[in-house]
Image: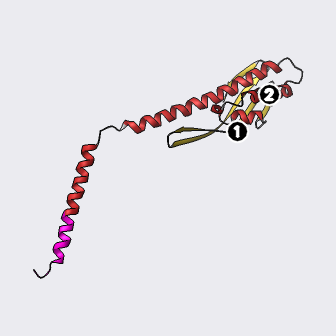
Amino acid sequence: MLNRRAHVGTLLLVFCSFFLMGAAIYSMLSFKGNFNDGSKDLQKLSYELAYNRAFIIGTARSLVFRAVVSASSLPDFKKEFESSLQALAEKKRTNFTTGDAIFKISFGNYRIVQNGDKYSLFVDDVSYVVRDGATEIKNTFSFGIVFDKTGVLYVR
């Protein structure tokens, strides 16, 4: 009876342990056992990333092909190709799915390297954003399209 303060600490320890046990039991009983909810959202975002990248490259390839067709019979192929490419990109520029690739092409932010009768168009640092709720992923990449006066040969 001389030291009652020690009993208060012991009682607090018992009540805290009961509270922690109750919280643990509640969390075990309320768990639905589904780990896949978060992974489905991430899988959806990764599919959107892959789709948008393929869409951007496909759109740029289509623009290059149309510019090649319009400039193939003209005497100064490279100059006519560039002006045709920028004009086509200017018309396509309103589509925001293509990230900033079409914007870069329409403003001339690309490089064309000639190697014999083949040309390579390089667009650097193309970026786009995929969002799902609070999750946001920004992807940045570069690509190149190799073509000649007959059409697009391949994409790198």
**Dot 1: within a 10 Å radius of its alpha carbon, few (fewer than 14), some, or many (20 or more) residues?**
some
The stretch of residues the image draws in magenta is 1-14
Residue 8 is one of the magenta-drawn residues? yes
Q: Which label sits in the foreground, 1 or 2?
A: 2
In the rendered view, tell whether residue 23 sits above or below residue 119. below
**Quarter containing the C terminus:** top right
| Residue at x-position 35% and y-position 38% | 35
Please report the residue visible at 54 percent of the width from the left and 32 percent of the height from the top.
48
Query: At which x and y percent is residue 8?
Result: 18, 72
Query: What residue is shown at x 74% (from left), y 21% (from top)?
Result: 65
Point out which mark residue 124 bears. Answer: 1
Residue 141 lies left or right of residue 12; in this view the side is right
**Lower position in the chain sequence, tag 1 or tag 2:** 2
Q: CA distance from mark 1 to mark 2?
A: 20 Å
Q: Quadrant of residue 126?
A: top right
Q: Looking at this rendering, what residue extends furthest in the bottom direction?
A: 2
Q: Is residue 6 left or right of residue 145?
A: left
**Which residue is under mark 2?**
87
Residue closest to the eye, 64 or 86: 86
Q: Main secondary structure of the magenta part?
A: helix
Q: Position of residue 29 (x, y in %)?
A: 24, 44
Which amino acid type corresponds to the residue marked 2 in the rendered image?
Answer: Ala
- Does the magenta portion include 23? no
Work out whether residue 123 or residue 86 is closer to the camera in this orientation and state it.
86
The kind of residue on which mark 1 rests is Asp
